[in-house]
Image (cartoon, helix red, strand yellow):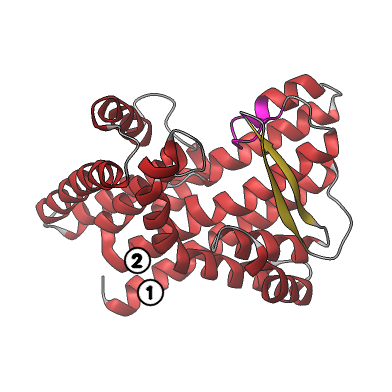
């Protein structure tokens, strides 16, 4: 809970962010380890994730007193969570749209999505923001809390490392189709329980509980991601909107995503309710994780 409160109050560190440092290390190693080969990608993943996991285990063992262990867990939780920064970026895009700065909104949206934003309309931008808020609330908040409750500091660090590598190399492209295969598969496995918890919290906290449940059960399986589909469908149903459609990525790659939810297409005014729902889901995940730790006597 203290780590979650720190993330809500402070957001990500502006300088010397450990996750950003990990990303720079991964990029540097990639210049040496890259090959269009799954085995090289597996080695890349194993070296990076194994290294930070070992460091986290060592730090946890060194924090022998309850106070030291609590402080370490709080600081690491603050470092790995991304809820406040996600909210800040989504709100900034909404403000630019509200002010009529379409080009500025397209540019700022690149901090949230990997798709090509150059020709997106205001409503398409709104859809991209809501989908990113839903998916990243699961990845950068709910799943982190869950793995922290299960495995302490190593769980927090390992999940964030895996998720960061997935964002860097775990996507479909000519360069990463083979090299990023392991990163994508490991992230799918670690994200599986967090996405389901995120879906349950969305059903519980959303303004339309029945709509969230129906959309999850009916539509999630049609999403190409086994995890993003759960939270995006749940958010769509809870907010009474329809997500999915055609996404265009750099290099002219297009994906036709299945439609989720039965409402109308999103508009810029839907960004604020999505952010509020994500905030509630995040606090719910923090409470669940804290309760789980108390039950286990940690």
Lateral position of residue 190 relative to residue 137, left or right: left
**At numbered mark 1, what does the secondary structure look like: helix, strand or loop?**
helix
Numbered label attached to residue 149: 2
The magenta stretch spans residue 110: yes
Q: Position of residue 237 (x, y in %)?
A: 77, 66
Distance between the Cα atoms at labels 1 and 2? 6 Å
Pointers 1 and 2 in contact (C-beta within 8 Å):
yes
Lateral position of residue 170 relative to residue 212, left or right: left
Callout 1: few (<14), some (14-19), or many (20+) C-alpha neighbours within 10 Å?
Answer: some
Residue 259 visible in image: yes
Which residue is more in the foreground, 246 or 271?
246
Number of numbered discs: 2
Q: Which residue is mark 1?
A: 292
Lateral position of residue 162 relative to residue 280, left or right: left
Which residue is more in the foreground, 272 or 53?
53
Q: Position of residue 242 (x, y in %)?
A: 81, 57
The magenta stretch spans residue 68: no
Q: Position of residue 23 (x, y in %)?
A: 35, 32
Q: If you read the primary sequence from the N terminus, does the residue marked by circle 1 or circle 2 appear first? A: 2
Name the residue: 30% across, 49% down.
157
Name the residue: 54% across, 64% down.
226
Lateral position of residue 210 relative to residue 114, left or right: right
Residue 1 visible in image: no
Magenta residues span 108-117
Name the residue: 61% across, 28% down.
251
Tell me the quarter of the picture where residue 187 sits. Answer: bottom left
Q: Position of residue 225 (x, y in %)?
A: 56, 58
Secondary structure mostly seen in the magenta stretch = loop
Residue at the farthest right position: 264
């Amino acid at each position: 809970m203290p780590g979650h409160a720190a993330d809500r109050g402070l957001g990500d560190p502006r300088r010397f962010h450990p996750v950003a440092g990990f990303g720079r290390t991964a990029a540097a190693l990639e210049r040496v380890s890259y090959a269009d080969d799954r085995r090289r990608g597996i080695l890349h993943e194993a070296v990076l994730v194994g290294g930070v996991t070992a460091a986290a285990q060592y730090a946890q063992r060194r924090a022998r007193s309850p106070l030291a262990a609590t402080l370490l867990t709080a600081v690491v939780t603050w470092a790995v969570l991304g809820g406040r920064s996600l909210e800040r970026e989504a709100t900034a895009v909404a403000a630019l749209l509200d002010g009529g700065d379409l080009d500025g909104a397209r540019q700022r949206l690149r901090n949230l999505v990997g798709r090509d934003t150059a020709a997106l309309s205001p409503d398409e931008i709104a859809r991209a923001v809501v989908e990113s808020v839903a998916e990243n609330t699961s990845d950068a908040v709910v799943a982190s809390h869950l793995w922290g409750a299960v495995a302490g500091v190593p769980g927090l660090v390992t999940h964030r490392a895996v998720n960061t590598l997935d964002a860097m190399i775990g996507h479909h492209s000519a360069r990463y189709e083979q090299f990023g295969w392991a990163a994508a598969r490991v992230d799918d496995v670690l994200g599986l329980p967090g996405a389901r918890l995120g879906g349950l919290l969305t059903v519980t906290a959303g303004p339309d509980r029945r709509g969230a449940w129906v959309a999850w059960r009916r539509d999630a399986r049609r999403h190409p991601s086994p995890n993003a589909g759960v939270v995006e469908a749940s958010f769509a149903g809870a907010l009474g909107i329809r997500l999915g459609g055609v996404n265009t990525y750099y290099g002219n790659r297009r994906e036709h995503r299945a439609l989720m939810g039965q409402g109308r297409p999103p508009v810029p005014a839907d960004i604020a309710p999505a952010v509020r729902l994500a905030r509630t889901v995040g606090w719910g995940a923090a409470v669940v994780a804290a309760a789980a730790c108390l039950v286990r006597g940690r």
